Image (cartoon, grey):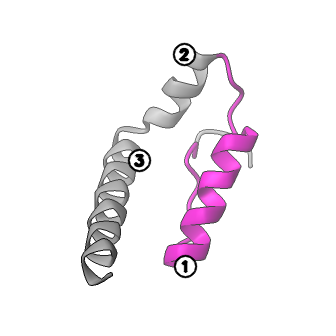
Amino acid sequence: MHRNNDFSNYVSVFFILLLFCMLSCSCFSKINKKLGLKDDNVIEEVIEEIIENKLNIDVDLTPESKE
């Protein structure tokens, strides 16, 4: 059981690092455009909410948008 928890922690750290790398490159707007999505779409808002709930950090994945 302890081993599974360690793996979960590693996965969480990986995704956090990946997120910050993407934020620093402001890739989310580019990804949205490539996928044909508008900024501040449902998927993005859910990701922002998860980050805020888990890490207690208020983020905007597309800072160029009006929101």
First in sequence, mark 3 or 2: give its number.
Answer: 3
Q: Is residue 56 left or right of residue 25?
A: right
**Residue type for callout 3:** Leu
Tag on residue 34? 2
User: Toward which corner of the image does residue 62 lie, by quadrant?
Assistant: top right
Q: Nearer the viewer, mark 3 or mark 1?
A: 1
Mark toward the start of the polypeptide (1 vs 2): 2
Q: Nearer the viewer, residue 25 or 10?
A: 10
Location of residue 61 in the rendering, given as x and y in whole percent from the top left corner: 55, 48
Q: Position of residue 7 (x, y in %)?
A: 27, 67
Residue type at mark 1 is Asn
* Residue annotated with mark 1: 56
Q: Is residue 32 magenta?
A: no
Residue 11 location, quadrant = bottom left
Q: Which residue was labeled with disc 3?
A: 23
Is 45 above or below relative to 9?
Answer: above
Task: Please say whether residue 44 is one of the residues in the magenta stretch.
Answer: yes
- CA gap between label 3 and label 2 equals 16 Å
Q: At x 54% / y 16%, what residue is drawn?
A: 34
Q: Which residues are magenta?
A: 36-63
Labels 3 and 2 touching (C-beta < 8 A): no
Eyeballing the image, is 41 above or below 8?
A: above
- Mark 3 vs mark 2, foreground winner is 2
Q: What's the mark number on residue 25?
A: none
Q: Type of residue at label 2?
A: Lys
Identity of the residue drawn at 31% across and 72% down: 4
Mark pair 1, 2: CA separation:
29 Å
Mark 3 → mark 1, Cα distance in angstroms: 17 Å
**Circle 3 SS class:** helix
Local crowd size for mark 3, using a 10 Å CA cut-off: few (<14), some (14–19), many (≥20): some
